[in-house]
Amino acid sequence: MSEPVQKPLPFGFQFLAGAIAGVSEILVMYPLDVVKTRAQLSTGVSTGIVETLKNMVKHEGTASLYRGIAAPIMVEAPKRATKFAANEQYTTLYKKLFGFEKVTQSLSVMTGVSAGITEAFLIVPFELVKVRMQDKANLGRYTGTADAFKKIIAAEGSMALFNGLEATMWRHGVWNGAYFGLIYKVKDILPKSKDASEQRMINFAAGTAGGIVATACNTPFDVVKTRIQSYNGVGIKKYNWTLPSLVTVAKEEGFASLYRGFTPKVLRLGPGGGILLVVFETVSSFIRKNILKEE
Ligand SMILES: *[C@@H]1O[C@H](CO)[C@@H](O)[C@H](O)[C@H]1NC(C)=O
């Protein structure tokens, strides 16, 4: 069942297919993101995933499962563009600075960490608004995402949108560092296939394994980020810098609390990656057939 080798789609189409895949993944997996945020904000015993979803539907309506979804959708395409451009730029820069001849594992780690940190600047306001919308404490406070942006700026100033920037840098830097640190080793272990679709499955398995480890490394930073971003200027500001906040959470609620929301986060990876893959392939072949008129 070996397919002929296809030349890659022109960049613009690849980008389009990627963005459509990314938005599809958000549309399907978003309720798990709401569950994750709720778990990270709770300080006591948190309920399981299914129970949380059931309770939300019962008490807040089905639409609550999608509360705040506009923010990540809006930033999905710009985020991909930033990730891509940052990767290119850092690769060129580090090749020049450190004399790498080709892309090695350590270059990938350095580039990934830098690109993750860069990406944080773009996404942090959208992440903040998403967290505020998802927070149960804010039910009825905002009519929608645009209203949340407006009210947060009016009450707290526009710089408040960047609360949690440092924690977001940690979250993305650590994720990319762990992922690229691991993925080469995983790919070495896994078999290689000449069959294109089989190779895609192998890459998918490698990506999921890398994602699970990366998520295990970055969840504590995600917990702190969510806590920082939920603070609305009223009452005691409990969390400021990321590292001391990790200590605070562990001390007050136990070490395991740094892993609040880990299960919904990790459960999203496999199916989420599958959706990305299938939608990307489907859109790509649609473009090949109907727009590029390839055979
Ligand atoms: C965080 O900073 C605020 C002022 O910016 C301060 O009032 C608060 O005590 C700080 N919290 C911690 C835990 O250091």
Image (cartoon, grey):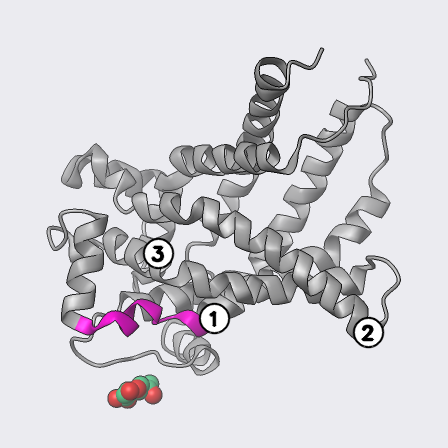
Question: Mark 3 is on which residue type?
Answer: Phe
- Quadrant into which the C terminus falls: top right
> Which amino acid type corresponds to the residue marked 1 in the rendered image?
Phe
Q: Quadrant of residue 57?
A: top left
Report the Cα–Cα distance between label 3 and label 1. 28 Å
At which x and y percent is residue 25?
47, 35
Marker disc for residue 98: 2
User: Where residue 166 sits in the image (x, y, percent)?
Assistant: 45, 74
Q: Looking at this view, is 37 or 21 the one in front?
A: 21
Q: Badges 2 and 3: C-beta atoms under 8 Å apart?
A: no
In front of the other: 105 or 222: 105
Q: Residue at x 68, y 56 (%)?
A: 88
Residue 114 in the image: above or below residue 135: below
Left or right placement of residue 284 versus residue 56 in this view: right
Would residue 217 be seen by someone viewing this image from the given angle?
no
Question: Start and end of the magenta stretch?
Answer: 156-166
Q: Residues within 10 Å of mark 1 (few under 14, many from 20)?
A: some
The residue depicted at 42 percent of the width and 81 percent of the height is 241
Q: Residue 227 colored magenta?
A: no
Ligand 1 resides in the quarter of the picture at: bottom left
